[in-house]
Image: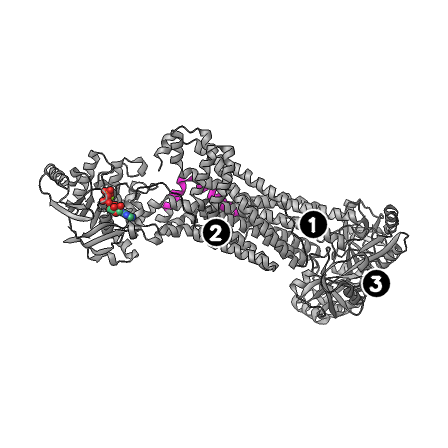
Amino acid sequence: MSIQLTLAARYMAGRKLRTFLTTLAVIFGVTIVFGLNGLLPAFSEAFRQNMLASAGKIDLTVTSASGGTFEAEVIAPVRSVNGIDEATPILRQNAILPTGQAVNAVTVVGVDPESFSQVRPHSLVLGRYLQAGDKNALVLGEKLAEEMGLKLGDIFTLPSAAGATDFAVVGVIATQGVLGVEEVYVPLSTAQAMFNQAGRLNTIEARFAAQADRVQVAAAVQAQLGNRFKLGEIEGGGQFLSALAMGQIVLNLFGVLALAMGGFIILNTFRTVVAERRRDIGMLRALGATRGMVVGIILAESLLQGLLGTAIGMLIGAGLAYSLIGLIRPIFEQFLHMSFTGRPVFDIPVFIWALVLGVGITMLSGLLPAISASRVVPLEALRPMVGVAAQRAARRGAWVGAGLIGLAALTLISGAPKAAAAGAFLVLIGLVLAGPALVRPIALLFGRLLTVIFAREGQIAQGNMTRQPGRAAITASAMMIGLALIIACAGMMSSMEEGIGRYLAKSMGSDFLLMPASLVLGGGNVGASPELAQAIRDTPGVQDVTTLRLANSEARGTALQLVGIEPESFARVGGMEFMLGSEAQIYQELRNGRGIILNGVFAVRNPVQLGEWVTLKTPDGERAYQVVGVGSDLLNAKAATGFISQANLAADFHESNDLLLMVNKTPEAEVTAVRSALDGLVKQYPALTVMESTEWRETMIGMFGKVVGSLYFVLIALAIPSLIALVNTLAINVIERTREIGVIRAVGGTRRQVQRMILAESLLLAILGIAFGILAGLWLGYSLVGAVGVVGFKLTYFFPATSVLIATAVGLIFGVIAALLPARQAAQLQIVRALRYE
Amino acid sequence: MAIIQTNNLSKVYGSGDAVVTALRDVSLTVETGEFVAVMGPSGCGKSTLLHLIGGLDRPTAGTIQLDGDDLSRLSDTRLTEVRRRKIGFVFQFFNLIPVLDAVENAALPLILDGMKLAAARATAAEWLQRVGLDGQTSHRPDQLSGGQQQRVAIARALATEPALVLADEPTGNLDSRASDEVAGLLRQVADEWQRAVLMVTHDPRIAAYADRIVFLKDGSIIDQARLNGTPLEGAQLVRDKVEAL
Ligand SMILES: Nc1ncnc2c1ncn2[C@@H]1O[C@H](COP(=O)(O)OP(=O)(O)OP(=O)(O)O)[C@@H](O)[C@H]1O
Ligand SMILES: [Mg+2]
């Protein structure tokens, strides 16, 4: 072993607690990065497996490039391609079952019995398969039949555009569901009637001839059909996977932040290491060690610590991944009906990523102290040790920090939201730099307060903390990042909660809503045929009705969800907030020709001007639409969406089912009376539920609250490194002042007094971190809320009072917890040994 | 042969009102195999002189020739190399690395110079034996007495076979018996191994082990004395000189 590593290992072993705490900081970050990265492939794998299991026998699928339906005649050119053995037309649609059933959704697959069984053979468990001439016959999977308690000959009612349709169960097959939604098979013509899609399909499945060259056949099919159609890809998969990728990025970000906090802890440790060993280092220099060697010794130590922490972090991370899988599996199997056999996958890139981050950040944090160690002159070895005198706060850092904060303030005043969001991170950096200079004033301010509680000990603690403003500031910085994230996210959340309430009132302002039980627009939900809306219009007590329809398209290379509205009634009953264009004019223009309102999500990605033309993919080719406005509503706040008239949606996208109906009653009508009338009408449409809007708004906000609640847990976990930072610093302080503590005890200080001294110092450090954290967190939150506005969702900042209190409480509790171990250690020092300590 | 030769060496600390002239025009020569003691009142510049000769600090004016090299002109890297290869240091505070044991401490300069670990350990162990410390080679510094620690430091100073050994009050922390042993060792270093030894001390009894004594006052050499009688006579001579100053 080289001398660098020997020295590093020996020094580390001599300071076990400190080594442990420093390593812990690395472990925490690596655990998150490694564990979660190992977990994610299991999810994508489970998903892929389920896709393959159900699609195992299918060689080729053909769907419309825009995602909608197409005319049944398309089957002919597919069949004509050389190498295609058989092709079968399919119309598949998700259907929400009425509440109270064992299963809440199925995929209705309308098939042509003969060709379908050629393409996708099934193994029959009971009864028979569908036959030509069947009308209301249905075949379903074994598992679904069991769950719903259905036997041969039983009636299965499916919601449809024309009201409910009854089917007789004629057969049970052994199949698996796609994406957790079980399939039921019905005759194609019946499905087309049910969904108001006479003569149309949305999928063709084909089987290749035995010796066909797969790639060539696929290319030939594509050539026959042209680019209106896409091959192979099973719909929905892409979205799911990109959501996973997004989740991975967010989790990695958390890991990196945790490691950044770890970096501060390591920085602190190595600064102390260097201060403590100035003499040893000076002597090594006197004996002829070069500067490079000195850097090497400190870096070797951080390398060891990084490797150790990374290794342990990987172990714990793997353990975490395995136990999380154990927790998640039942959820997948029970609620999503997906078989989940995945195991965590730790392949080379995951190892490399964890190693690079874990070791990299440790070494990087060791670098500055290492360089300062190499500046130690040999003469330092020869001067007798004169205890470490109080450090002076770094002036230059303070000025640079103040400059950065000033710059950030300018970006905030400038009103440019993106600049302000970037500025918020300048504040974080600025506070880290200015930290040491702020330690004294803050310590003096709160030290007074502590003196009230802790009497003399408080004063000593205050003095102790200001002796090492650099160390105190770094500790506070680690804590600041943790708490700032809590407060910033809380600020975002409460602003969004308030904003959503406001948006809901504006865009879902009707008295009643009729909507599918699970409200995800775009999920291929079954709606209702236009008759329902007409029937409601004719109901006494109803003043106004407007409906939303849905289709999928693509524009400028992005998937675009199209919402069909009826401009006149939508303006009265529904509504949205516009960023471009005047409201009255927009609705007017939507009715004449092909006009489109684009939402903020789309506009951010593809900046558009009023009057510009965008080309939309339709099932029948491309159509140009003119932009008449840019605005946002709540339902579609997450997806790129365009709003067009229902007339155009029917003409270009063949979609005339209502997915969501908004109803206003007359002022004099009784709520209960109108509601029961609506309930009566909707009975025929099990897919839809009637809700009073106020009730629905509350449910939505409640759901949002739950999501926020669970997010807080993650955030608080993220604050844990700041606890480690506190313990680490206090432990360092105790070690460094072993002799002083010995003197205090020798002249009659009690163990209790020593403990209270450490506790008071811990609390002061925590207060410093809390102060930094609140300032940075509010700033970050405020500018992030502004940045969200850029995405087309204007929010007003809402002061997160509760979270500021929570962060303060968490910080103070951490302060107390952190003091426990070091205080005990200090109190139990043997006086004689402490006095001899060097 | 002169191993060290300083020419009008001066060192000034601080600037403006706070200027301290620690050394003033010191010209000193030390021969190979010669044992020289430096004496003088506290603050007269003894340590400063040793630091300059040892390449730990740079002079304000004047030159230092060490074995042919002019130290004041060397880069930091070269100076480091000179310290590693040509000079051995023994300090008042023993200055051993606390986490290394006796052999490892003594072997440190060899290891720093790139010698293989096993070879370095063997050489160090040999030197420990020569300075009379063979029982406790695997003890850490805190498990050794002051005199034993100082022997380790001397072994360390000799391990690289340097041309010059510099010792700044090597007996300052030892009782009289241990002091005699350490001074005897340094005597041996000069006689048997033909190293030049430059030692600072306050103790006339210890200074008497040297061949020559240089007296410093306010940064200048004010007197020199060559000793050739018995140690007892030498000590008496030194005492007289010190009193005369
Ligand atoms: N780094 C420094 N900065 C300023 N002045 C210094 C420095 N080092 C030494 N001096 C001054 O230089 C003078 C000589 O110091 P030096 O350490 O050489 O004395 P000394 O003879 O070794 O004394 P002692 O016997 O007490 O060790 C003293 O006046 C001292 O105050
Ligand atoms: Mg001195």
Q: Secondary structure at mark 1?
A: helix
Check if mark 2's residue and mark 1's residue have beta carbons within 8 Å.
no
Instruction: State the image coordinates of residue A621 (x, y, percent, origin top left).
Output: 74, 70
Q: Mark 1 belongs to which subunit? A: A
Q: Mark 2 belongs to which subunit? A: A
> In this rendering, does residue A511 appear at all?
yes
Confirm whether circles 2 and 3 share one chain: yes
Q: Nearer the viewer, mark 2 or mark 3?
A: 2
Residue type at the position of mark 1: Glu
Q: Where A367 sits versus B242, above or below?
A: below
Q: Quadrant of the C terminus of chain A?
A: top left
Which residue is located at x 16 percent, y 38 percent? Answer: B204
Which residue is identified by label 3? A198
Which residue is identified by label 1? A498
Label 1: few (<14), some (14–19) or many (≥20) C-alpha neighbours in 10 Å: some
Instruction: Please give the label number shown on residue B214.
Output: none
Q: Is residue A801 magenta?
A: no
Task: Name the N-terminal-most of marks 2 and 3.
Answer: 3
Confirm whether circles 2 and 1 share one chain: yes
Q: Is residue A24 magenta?
A: yes
Quarter where residue A625 is shown: bottom right
Label 3: few (<14), some (14–19) or many (≥20) C-alpha neighbours in 10 Å: some
Instruction: Please give the label number shown on residue A433.
Output: 2
Q: How far is disc 2 from disc 3 in space, using C-alphas?
A: 69 Å
Closer to the camera, A137 or A444? A444
The majority secondary structure of the magenta stretch comes to helix
* Range of magenta residues: A6-31
Q: Secondary structure at mark 3?
A: loop
Query: Which residue in the rendered view is the most extreme toward the front?
Result: B17
Is A114 on the left-hand or right-hand side of B73?
Answer: right
